[in-house]
Amino acid sequence: MAKAAAKTNASAMPSTAERRPALAGRSVSATGVKLEITPPAERISLRAPEASLAALSKALGVTLPTKPKTSATKAGRTALWLGPDEWLIIDEAGKDPLADCAKVAALHSAVGISHRNVAFSVTGPAAAAAINGGCPQDLSLEVFPVGAASRTILGKSEIVLLRSGPDAFRVECWRSFSDYVFTLLSEAASDAAA
């Protein structure tokens, strides 16, 4: 009798789960800085030797950058250089970079991390000051220009930072650290506005 009840309850449950973005709807506005959760995006962690870069760049539709602290963007897809053979690929156009890499025969490793990461946009004239509230990196335009990207820290969390405009940044972090990163950035935004 218990087995029959369990089967009935299980069949009444929906077959798919609704995935909600971490911290959905949260934002902070202070004088000179705005902090928002970015819409969900497709992401992959890509590792590849130099000999594979041309084939991967062609498949992804964006030239993989090869210099430290650089990124490249084309048609809603951004490639961020993280190390000599490592990139973070972010697709905000609704395409699947993992599927694009699967077509490439050249040696590489591509791992889907779309649900592992969360991103925040930090914008406004005090955006760099807000990020520097927990990040020791020099964010002056001369040292960290538009398009610059790096793996760094914010407080006690590892982040990937991209400067998307003179007063605009994208902060990527692991979902498990997203509340901590958002709270730290919120406090720093309030301090930067003071």
Image (cartoon, rainbow, N blue to C red):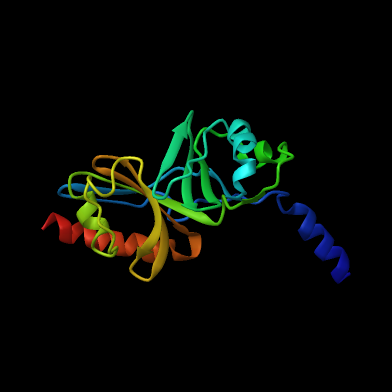
- Residue 184: x %, y % from top left: 30, 64
Asked if 102 appears above or below 1 in the picture, the reply is above
Asked if 161 appears above or below 55 in the picture, the reply is below
Quarter-of-image position of residue 56? top right
Residue at the (49%, 60%) spot, across then down: 175
Count of numbered marks: 0
Residue at the (47%, 55%) spot, across then down: 22
- Residue 120: x %, y % from top left: 38, 50
Residue at the farthest top position? 75
- Foreground of the two, 77 or 39: 77
Say left or right for 163 vs 174. Answer: left
Say left or right for 80 vs 154. Answer: right
Asked if residue 157 can be seen in this view, the reply is yes
Quadrant position of the C terminus in the picture: bottom left
- Residue 43: x %, y % from top left: 55, 46
Quadrant position of the N terminus in the picture: bottom right
Asked if 80 appears above or below 173 in the picture, the reply is above
Say left or right for 15 vs 116. Answer: right
Residue at the (50%, 44%) spot, across then down: 40
Quarter-of-image position of residue 104? top right
Residue at the farthest left position? 194
- Foreground of the two, 98 or 107: 107
